[in-house]
Each structure stands twice: as C-alpha cells, then as structure tokens.
Image (spheres, rainbow, N blue to C red):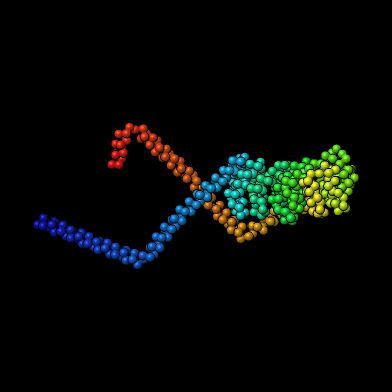
Amino acid sequence: MADKSVSVRLDAAVAGYQAKLAAASRSTRDFGRDVLDVSARNEQAFNRLGTAAVVGGGAILAGFGGAATAAIGWESAFAGVRKTVEGTPAQLAAINAGLRDMAKTLPTSRTELAGIAESAGQLGIKTPNVLGFTKVMADLGETTNLSADQAATSLARLANITSMPQDQFDRLGSTVVALGNNLATTESEIVEMSLRLAGAGRQVGFTEAQTLALAAALSSVGVEAEAGGTALSRTMVEINKSVASGSDELDVFAQAAGMSAAEFSAAWERDAAGTLNQFILGVGRLSDAGVNVDQVLTDLGLDGIRVADAIKRISGNQTLLTDALDLGTSAWDANSALTREANLRYQTTEARLKMALNAATDLAVGLGTNLLPAINMSITVTQGLVWVMDSALGIFDRLPGPIKQVSLGLGLF
C-alpha cells in the first residue's frame, strides 16, 4: 500500500510540473507574439530610433574628431610662437590665451594670429608687447591694402630704424591709416617710402609721424619709393651738413626758405621737418617767380635727376607737405584712426560670420585639448607595437630558409 501511495504522489507531482511547463510555454509564446505584434505595429518608430542612434553616435564621434583636429592644428600653430618668442611658461600661456581670445573679436583666424605673433618674435618684439603688436598688424591686414605679414615686417623694421618704443605700434598704425585715407596714396606706398626715409629722418630728428607724413606727401605726387627715398634723404643730409659746418650752401638753403642763415640753423635744430617744409615751399616760390630751380639745386649739391624731380614735384603743391605733417602729427596724438577703421570693418556681416566661426573653433580647441593626452598615449602605444613587430620581423628575416617555411606553414595552419 505504501508503495502505491508514493507512486500516486509522484505521478501527481509530475503532472503538476508538466502543467506548469505547458502554461509557461504558452506564456512564452504569447509574449513572443506580443513582442512581434508591437514590433510590427511600431516598425517605423523603431527604425527612426535606430537611425537617430546611429546618426547621433556618428555626430558625437565626428565632433570629437573635429575637436581633436582643431586642437592639434592650434598646437602646431602655437609651436611656431614658442620657437621665436622667449618667455616663461606663464607668459607663453598668457599669449596662448590672448591669441585665442583675440580671434573671437577679429575676423582673422587664430592660426593667422599665431603666424603674426611668430613673426613678432623673429622681428625682435619683446614678449610683453607681442599681443599688442599682433592686434595692430591684424587690424592693418583687415583694413588696408597691407597684408598682416607685410605690415608686421615693414613696421617692425621702421621701429628698429627710428628706435621707436614697442608700445607705440598702435600710434604708428593709426598714422598710416589716417594719411592713407586723406592723401592720394595707399598705406603700402607710405610704408615702403617711409623705410627709405627713416634712416636720414632719424639722423636729423624727424619723429615717426613726420617721416610717415613726408613719405605720404612724396608718394601722393607719384614719386616712387626708391627715387623719393634717395632724393629726400640726400636733401636732409645736405641740409644737416651745411647747418653743422656753416658752409656757403647754408646761405642758399636759408635764402630759399626765406630766412637768414642763423634763423635757418636755429629752426633746423628745433624742427627739422618744419624747416625742410619751408625750404620746399621756398623752391616752389622760386619756380613760380621764374627762377631757374635746377641751377639753385645744383648750387646746393642736389643736382641729380631724381633729387631735382622729387623736390620739384612736391614743391609744386604749396600746401601738400604742410597738410601732411599736420595730419600725421594729429593722427599720432589722437591714436584713433586705425581703431575707427577696424570697427567699421568688423561690423560687417562677413566679419561677424568669421568671428562666430572663430568662437566655435575655439570651443573645439578647448574640447580637443583635453583629448590630446589620450591621443598621445595611443600614439606611444602604437609606436611601441610597431617597434615590437619590426623587431620580430627582423628576427624572422635572419632565420634559415627551411625554418621560415615551417614557421609560415604552422602559422597558416
């Protein structure tokens, strides 16, 4: 009886488990049908979700890739600045940040700004003045017919010739712009002529503004830089020699200027540029009076064709040099012409779009900079793997031929 009772209970238990398994199987089938049902009803939604996931993931990867590329490009551009500009880590970091900030307010890219800063170091601009110099040259490149590189090279050399303090490049730029806007010449012509006049001008006491003004006046009457620079430099040197020696030529210079020799000497010592202007105005008056100007210039040792031509051209306009000198000096003192011109340029839609792009690129540089350590680590690991593989291949190449064949066979197997 006991055995029979146990058997009955076992059968009942087995039947119960079988029923539960059957119910579970039915539930699984029902769930599967429900899932398929839901999938079928929402196929388009799932497809859109999958597409969005793929596109979003691709966009994120592309964003990180773009950020890394931007950071790598900026790192390379600033390496040139590090090469030419001497400074402490803190000073270089300040220049780095300053160039990036500057690009947000200028339509000039940060890579171009880094190029100007690199040139600044090569041209002898001191570290504290690099950012100011870069801003002025970028403004000139955007608002005049000078490129930023041309402006940087030419004006840095002009400053070196005249021993101008390096914190006055903004005044130099404003003077160039004011003269270019108001006389019949261009900024590039003024700067080119100024470089040829600067040495003699410095010797006799011209200011930077007066040198630029004389250059603007000469170029506005069509005198080429080489001819005009030679002619007026020679004139300044000859006047200076006659004043210093008290030679007979001093009387001729003085008479042409409408002064006595003593008055002319005193005026030259006090204001060489103004006195030169008086001499040139005097030559114009002599010409108008029918005097043989060529003979006068010959008596003064200024008988070269280029010298005579330049002096006669500029003396033909009675107020040209006077107005240029006044304008140059006032523009230097006001120091506003370049800023005003740049602000007009930077309010244009084109300039604002470029500045917006620069700001977006700066965000990418900031993000990519954080990725550079990981990228450099990956590069190091890759180089290590390449070295290991290269070493292994070197060892393999030195093995005897039969061993190579066996090794290749085992590798293929």
In screen coordinates, is 184 left or right of 242? left
In screen coordinates, is 250 left or right of 94? right
Q: Quadrant of residue 340?
A: bottom right
- Residue beneath the point at 66% across and 45% down: 153
Q: Nearer the viewer, residue 186 or 171?
A: 186
Residue with the most extreme left position: 1
- Residue beneath the point at 82% across and 42% down: 301
x, y (%) of residue 372? 50, 46
Q: Nearer the viewer, residue 228 or 189?
A: 228
Q: Nearer the viewer, residue 373 or 265?
A: 265
The quadrant of the rendering that contains the N terminus is: bottom left
How many numbered callouts? 0
The quadrant of the rendering that contains the C terminus is: top left
- Residue beneath the point at 63% across and 41% down: 122
In screen coordinates, is 247 left or right of 360? right
Q: Quadrant of residue 184?
A: bottom right
Q: Quadrant of residue 36?
A: bottom left
In screen coordinates, is 329 left or right of 150? right
x, y (%) of residue 308? 80, 47
Q: Nearer the viewer, residue 95 or 118?
A: 118
x, y (%) of residue 321? 79, 51
x, y (%) of residue 14? 18, 58
> Does the image show residue 335?
no
> Does the image show residue 294?
yes
- Residue beneath the point at 60% across and 49% down: 112
